[in-house]
Each structure stands twice: as structure tokens, then as C-alpha cells.
Amino acid sequence: MKFTRIFLLFALPLYFISCKPLQKIPNYLENVTDSTGRGMVKLTELKIQKNDLLSIQIYSLSTKPDQSDVIYNQPAIGGQAPGYLVDNDGNIEHHRLGVFHAEGLTKNELAAAIKKRLKEPVEVMTDPSVIIRFMNLKVTVLGQVGHEGPVSVPGERLTIFEAVGLAGGITDYGKKNNVKVIRETNGQRETAVLDLTSKDIFDSPFYNLVQNDMVIVESTQQKIKDAEQAKTMQKISIAFTLVTVAATLTNIFIRN
């Protein structure tokens, strides 16, 4: 087994050189020490975007809502109303009231526009109430998280921490201090880099996500090094196997 010994003399030092101590993994909000520095909670009211699907329900104070209100509400299909899709021009087309420009408005602003049309130029409904909800809110989380892909927004508010949590959390190989958020607003693409280890994260306008945001968690250098080391060790293992087989066959032929 002379060949094996010679090979080990070269392989083992390479193995131990490649093994480095693990780097410290930063924690979320690492530099937050106590709650004495209180700050205001900033709530972002979502703006309607193209391709949003909206639920619009209209009610009145009529004593016969089954006659006056029902014609302004879409019939349910399978227990759920189909909703109104915001088209590429930023409009929705209500089946009774016509076209409304919705892109860039909040739910309350669109509701006000619908109420106005119900009362002007002719009042067709007494004291109308308009309830609007988003039906397809989601963000996409990619990179070093538990599971990549779209994340449905439970409700109408989602923070960066909630999105990461719903995606299974950032892995040990993910950069918590360098998380990218890509957002499209009014046809313009914005990119922000967030540090989830810092208390300053709460002041970022990207802390509260909006629909269709993309969150990207990049790999650490340790991840890249470990991948390279794994490839090196795989090559060493294959080479060791070949040398062992060669040495075994050589011994067999020499004995014979």
C-alpha cells in the first residue's frame, strides 16, 4: 500500500488547510439592546398597481338591498366574487358603473371615486358604502432562505421580517446585513439594500413591503468557499479511490 501512503501524505495536509473555523453568524437586530428608544410605527397604505385583483362591494341604507344593491355587486362564483383586474392602462371596468382609473390610488381614494359616481350626476344609491380589498397580494423571496418563491401577504401589511419568516428564514449562508428589495413604482424600478441586523431598519421606506416587491438574500463568502472546498474534497476522494484501486491491483499482480 505504498501508493496509498504517499497519497495520504499529500491529501491530508490539503484537507486540514481547507478546514477553517466557522465565521460568526450575525443575528437579526443585533445592535438593538433595549426598548427605551421608542419610535413611531410607520404604516404604509398600499397603492393600487397594474395586475392587482380587487374585490369591490357596494352597500346602501336601502330597506330593500336585494333590489337596489345587488345589481352593483358581482355574483359570487364558488362562494367568492371574481374581482376586478387592474389592466395595463391602470383601469378597472365596473360591470355597472363603467371605467375607473385605479393605478396609483389607495383603496380609500378609489372608493371615494366610486361613491361620487353613485351620487353624481344622478343619485342612484342612498348613502353608499364601498368596501375594497386586495385579492392577490404577494411578494417574491429568492436566495438563501428556507424556501424560495412567491409569498402570499396575510392581510394587507407585510414587513421585511415577516416576508423572510414566511420564506423559512435566512439560512446560515445568507447575508442578513445585505438584503436587497426590488420595487417597481410608476414604471420605475428601485433597489434598496437593507441591514436586518440594525435597529435603523425600521426607518427604511422599504421596511414595509408592497405588493410585487422582490426580496433577494445573497450568499455569504463562506457559502462560496464551502462549495469550492466541497468540490476539492470530492476530487480528492475520487483520486484517493483510484489510487487505492490501483495499489490493490498492483499488489495482486505482484503476488501472482
Image (cartoon, grey):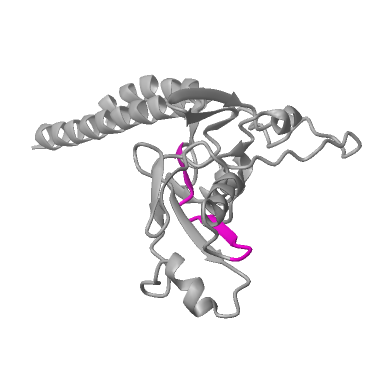
Quarter occupied by the N terminus: top left
- Which quarter of the figure has residue 230? top left
Residue range (magenta) = 126-142
Nearer to us in this view, 140 or 74: 74
Extreme residue in the front direction: 122
Extreme residue in the right direction: 36
Nearer to us in this view, 158 or 65: 65
Q: Is residue 67 left or right of residue 108?
A: left
- Magenta-drawn stretch contains 96: no
Q: Residue at x 70, y 41 (%)?
A: 43
Q: Is residue 209 left or right of residue 145?
A: right
Percent of width and height locating residue 243: 23, 29
Percent of width and height locating residue 145: 49, 41
Percent of width and height locating residue 147: 45, 47
Q: Residue at x 49, y 59 (%)?
A: 56
Q: Is residue 88 left or right of residue 24?
A: left
